[in-house]
Image (cartoon, helix red, strand yellow):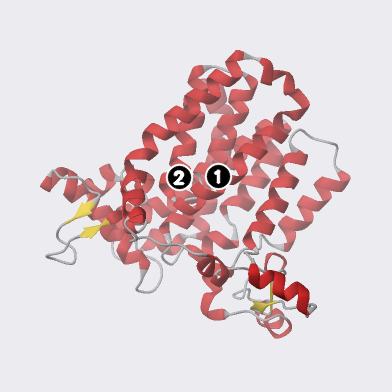
Amino acid sequence: MSRAALRRHTPALLVFLFLTLLSAYRIVASLATAVPGWEGDNLYYVRSLWWMKHALFALRISPLFDPTAYFPVGHQLARSELTAANTILALPITALWGPVVAYNIVLLLSFVATGFGTYLWVTTLTGRRASGLLAGTIAALLPLRFAHLPGHLPQVTTQWIPFALYAFELFLARRSARRAVAMGLFAALVVLGCWYYGFALALLFPPYVALRTWPVRHVWREAAWWRGLAIAVLAAVVLVVPFLVPMLHLQAGGEIRRSLADMEMWSLNVYDFFLPNPAHPLWGDAVSRWFAVDRGWWVERTVAIGYVASGLALAGLFLGRPRRGVLALVVIWLASYLIALGPTLHSGDAQVRFAVPARVAALGDRA
């Protein structure tokens, strides 16, 4: 980013910093003494921050295996989220002030960076900083982010997604090797921040790129386009593979398993995206009386972006002037919605079942 661009965008960065301090002031107030949430995954990630520093600087061993955990067996950190994009990038903070401060600062920076990254991306798409500021505010303060704040550090690491999309827009505007490397770097950070988001990126980014470039598909005939994509993929692979290979080894040995039953358990109801979160001070209880909501899993099932954000999106879609990339965004949202519903349809936290003729049922059994 040039100095002129930096000066132009600094006020927006300060806005997101202010919003973060305002909305997460309790984290700031107890920066070195406590972490948000109840006892659970948050403590695991505090230890992960400590372990990354301890393994690299004190023991001088690979941080991917912890011989001190579950002694004498040890622990393969590839069994769970190492969230390397957080634990490695936070190393200077962990070394200076400890893992608690590092954990809290990583959380706070995720708000600022998610907002600022979305601002840059949307400003580039629309040419309007006001639109970018509004979109960045919505993204930074999503209910989903606050739902996962009590302990799911990887799920809070949303900032690299808009930065990857912003890097793609820069590459589309000028197809240079430098911008291709940046796109690959941010894509790798998405994966290394949260494997869930990595799977989502792998599924949804290619169709987004295809739809986004359809109006200017002449770029597909350019050698610079394909060369840049190859560079981006190579940059991402180089960064991700060292952390992916141990997981693949464990999976090959049957030590990591994910089944359709797991997907079924986390499937969303058809209406979950359109309801206020269960903790909403005004409508949470009222909505819960009309729609079944498993409050035991409210963290994982808080996915709606809110009625104000939804209303603005619909107004922009139907009332605004046609903009670049709108079709791509709509298609990606629909695809994301269908994927989140899981392998079978759910309503009322239960499968939606229909009676079918015996012949059809028999075909299903044979399949």
Image coordinates of residue 100 in percent, x first then y, are: 29, 59
Residue type at numbered disc 1: Leu
Q: Quadrant of the C terminus?
A: bottom right
Image coordinates of residue 320 in percent, x first then y, are: 85, 42
In the image, residue 146 above or below residue 225: below
In the structure shown, which secondary structural element does the residue marked by tag 1 occupy?
helix
The image quadrant of residue 234 is top left
Residue 109 placement, left or right of 223 = left
CB under 8 Å between discs 2 and 1: yes
Q: Name the outermost residue toward the right.
A: 319
User: Which residue is disc 1 drawn over?
Assistant: 201
Residue 290 placement, left or right of 178 = right
In the image, residue 347 above or below residue 197: below
- Depth order, front residue of 226/136: 226
Residue at left 51%, top 57%? 22
Residue at left 23%, top 54%? 50
Image coordinates of residue 306 in percent, x first then y, are: 69, 62
Mark 1 crowd level (few <14, some 14–19, many ≥20, 10 Å Cα): some
Mark 2 crowd level (few <14, some 14–19, many ≥20, 10 Å Cα): many
Residue at left 66%, top 46%? 135
In the structure shown, which secondary structural element does the residue marked by tag 2 occupy?
helix
Q: Which mark is residue 228?
A: none
- Depth order, front residue of 126/235: 235
The image quadrant of residue 29 is bottom left
Q: Name the outermost residue toward the bottom.
A: 289
User: Which residue is disc 2 drawn over?
Assistant: 191
Residue type at numbered disc 2: Val
